[in-house]
Image (tube, rainbow, N blue to C red):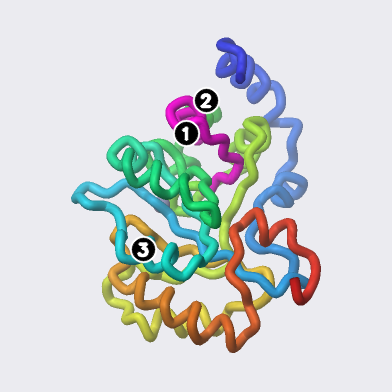
Amino acid sequence: MLPKAFPWILSALLIGSLEALSSPDSMAQVIKSGPPSCPGIALTFDLCPVKKSPGYDQALVDYLIQHQIPATFFMSGKWIAKHDAEVEHLLGIQFFEIGTHGEVHAHLPMHNAEEQQKEIHAPVRLLSEHYAHDTTLFRPPYGEYNDTTIDVVKLLGLRFIQWSIESGDPDPSLTADQILTRIEKRAKPGSIVVLHANGKGKQTRAVIERLTTDVLPRKSLKPMTVSELLACKQRNP
Ligand SMILES: [Zn+2]
């Protein structure tokens, strides 16, 4: 548990430390892929807030569970607040990993250190206090960040997870074939793919089915959670 004065301590630390941290050093903290020696790939699904319900791709999640496909979900605080049953369900699946994705899906670079800290920390605290689940993986909304974001993430003890492959799945103009081609062209050992599980990706379920039954086996790439991918070093696990 963090002491009650933690946000204030953190703010003081931030003010003191921001200038001390230079950007080339900080950039090393942003993880875009796993080790290239690992024959694995991480399928990650963002749960950004949505205005219209259900805001949850049940068919996609059912498919992942039915076929025991490891996956990592990045939940925003606003999404968690509207999806209590879904959060419990996802937390209960052994081969799923949960990370956070900001509280209100803010454009982080437009905010100061204290505001960024609130945006990043709120869903981490919610998962811990309300669901007794500690999360360490963080992905910034829109993939947007600046040096302050990197410093805040570091001070909160989180791991900063971006991606190496943008599937483009929320784009309604892309067909399943086009999304699949984008992923197939770039997929290699250690890749992290960003997709969505909030219902915005109309083709996501179809893409995942073809990816896991055809594309990835052909490339000898095994789906892993982000943590598994980052800890994986050997070929033929
Ligand atoms: Zn998002």
- Sooner in the amino-acid sequence: mark 2 or mark 1: 2
Location of residue 52 with respect to 221 vertically, above or below: above
Viewed as shown, does residue 40 lie left or right of 119?
right
Residue 235 can be seen in this image: yes
Location of residue 115 with respect to 87 vertically, above or below: above
Which is nearer the eye, 127 or 79? 127
- Assess disc 2: are there few (<14), some (14-19) or many (≥20) residues with their C-alpha within 10 Å of its C-alpha: some
Viewed as shown, does residue 88 lie left or right of 153?
left
Helix or strand or loop: what does disc 1 sit on? Answer: helix
What is the span of residues highlighted in magenta in the rendered image?
120-139
Q: Quadrant of the C terminus?
A: bottom right
The amino acid marked with disc number 3 is Asp
Tell me the residue that label 2 is attached to: 114
Viewed as shown, does residue 25 lie left or right of 85?
right
Q: Quadrant of residue 39?
A: bottom right
Seen at 52% across and 25% down, the residue is 114
- Assess disc 3: are there few (<14), some (14-19) or many (≥20) residues with their C-alpha within 10 Å of its C-alpha: few
Viewed as shown, does residue 31 lie left or right of 63?
right
Seen at 33% across and 55% down, the residue is 198
Tell me the residue that label 3 is attached to: 62
Which is nearer the eye, 177 or 117? 177
Could you tell me what secondary structure mostly forms the magenta stretch? helix
- Sooner in the amino-acid sequence: mark 1 or mark 3: 3
Seen at 40% across and 42% down, the residue is 88
Please state the horizontal and vertical placement of residue 186, each as a whole percent of the image.
Answer: 58, 79
Location of residue 84 with respect to 38 vertically, above or below: above
Tell me the residue that label 1 is attached to: 127
Confirm whether the magenta stretch covers residue 128.
yes
Spatial CA distance of label 1 from label 3 is 22 Å
Q: Are marks 1 and 3 in contact (CB under 8 Å)?
A: no
The amino acid marked with disc number 1 is Leu
